[in-house]
Image (cartoon, rainbow, N blue to C red):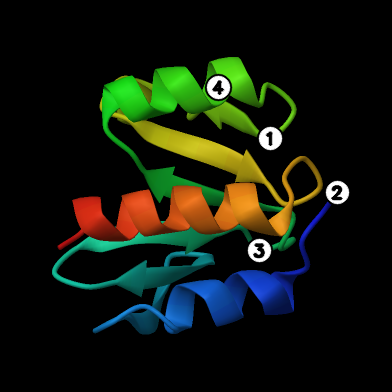
Amino acid sequence: MAISETELRDLVLALDGVTEKPHFDRAAFKVKRNFATLAPDKSTVNLLLLPEEQELRCELHPDGFTPVPNKWGERGWTVMSLEGVDIDVASSAIEAAWLNGK
């Protein structure tokens, strides 16, 4: 139950209008705004979720999702562990973040 960095990139870049650019020490994925950033160690990705989406995903998959531990987390930014999710859970979360970034 894990996804690779390659699988993550394939999922994200398959979405309509997504571009990838550097964002500080991370890789950022953007439509109109950044909706996902991949950590330098490629073990986690921060996703732009609505606070309600964040709460639900963290409750359903506590090994896969945690709020970003700062004010960004209060706004819905959520850490997704690539080790803690399978491809279906990751795909669903990425699509939700992509919609929020449009």
Looking at the image, which residue is at 74% across and 51% down? 86
Disc 1 to disc 4, how far (Cα)? 7 Å
Looking at the image, which residue is at 60% across and 21% down? 60
Disc 2 to disc 1, how far (Cα)? 10 Å
21 left or right of 3? left
Disc 3 element: loop
Give x and y (percent) for residue 89: 61, 47
Label 3: which residue?
A: 40
Label 1: which residue?
A: 64
Disc 2 element: loop
Mark 3, residues whose alpha carbon is within 10 Å: few (<14), some, or many (≥20)? few
What is the three-letter code of the residue carrying label 4?
Answer: Cys
Disc 4 element: helix
Which picture quadrant has residue 24?
bottom left
Disc 1 to disc 3, how far (Cα)? 18 Å
Label 4: which residue?
A: 58
What is the three-letter code of the residue carrying label 1?
Answer: Gly
- Which residue is nearer to you in this view: 79 or 93? 93
Disc 3 to disc 4, how far (Cα)? 23 Å
Residue 1: mark: 2
